[in-house]
Amino acid sequence: MTDEEHAAHIALRALINAQGIDAGGAMIAAASYMEQYGAGYPDVPLVSEQVRRDASLWADCAAPHELEAYTIAAIGALTESPLLDKQLRKLAALSYGRMNPETKQKFKDWINQQ
């Protein structure tokens, strides 16, 4: 990613954060930008040590809709293995930790109903 592309992604993040001031204007600008300059699909690194670093860089540049789409696809692609439960627990803990208190309570209530 060039310095110019990285700066553009930082600017987009700033627009998204500015939505509290002018939600309509920030969202229009952000949507227009993403339609033209989205992060696209993540590259597959040739060196396995770089997988997490490359994934983190791509995630920093991706739009929320791209993050959601690739996360759902990746979770669905996890194959049955002894590691699957460990991977799913790690994903669940990370997701739960990112929830606000109200959403955590709703999630707990949903779990208890299962």
Image: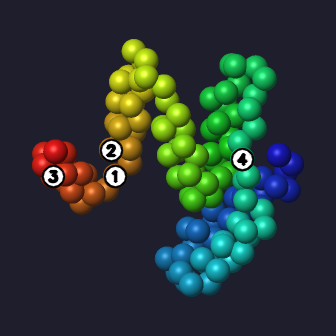
Residue 105: percent from left, percent from top: 19, 54
Label 1 residue SS: loop
Label 2 residue SS: helix
Q: In the displayed structure, does residue 113 sit left or right of residue 89?
A: left
Q: Residue at 73% across / 59% down in the picture?
A: 38
Residue 71: percent from left, percent from top: 53, 44
Label 3 residue SS: helix
Q: Residue farthest to the left?
A: 113
**Sequence-first tag of 4 and 2:** 4
CB atoms of marks 4 and 2 within 8 Å = no
Distance between the alpha carbons at the discs numbered 4 and 1: 26 Å
Q: Which residue is mark 2?
A: 96
Q: Residue at 38% across / 48% down in the picture?
A: 98
**Closer to the camera, 55 or 11?**
55
Q: Nearer the viewer, mark 1 or mark 3?
A: 3
The disc labelled 2 sits on which kind of residue? Tyr
Q: In the displayed structure, does residue 30 sit left or right of residue 97?
A: right
Q: Which residue is mark 3?
A: 109
The crowd level at tag 2 (other Cα within 10 Å; few <14, some 14-19, many 20+) is some
Tell me the tag on residue 41: 4
Tell me the tag on residue 99: 1
Label 4 residue SS: loop
Q: In the displayed structure, does residue 90 sit left or right of residue 38?
A: left
The crowd level at tag 1 (other Cα within 10 Å; few <14, some 14-19, many 20+) is few
**Sequence-first tag of 2 and 3:** 2
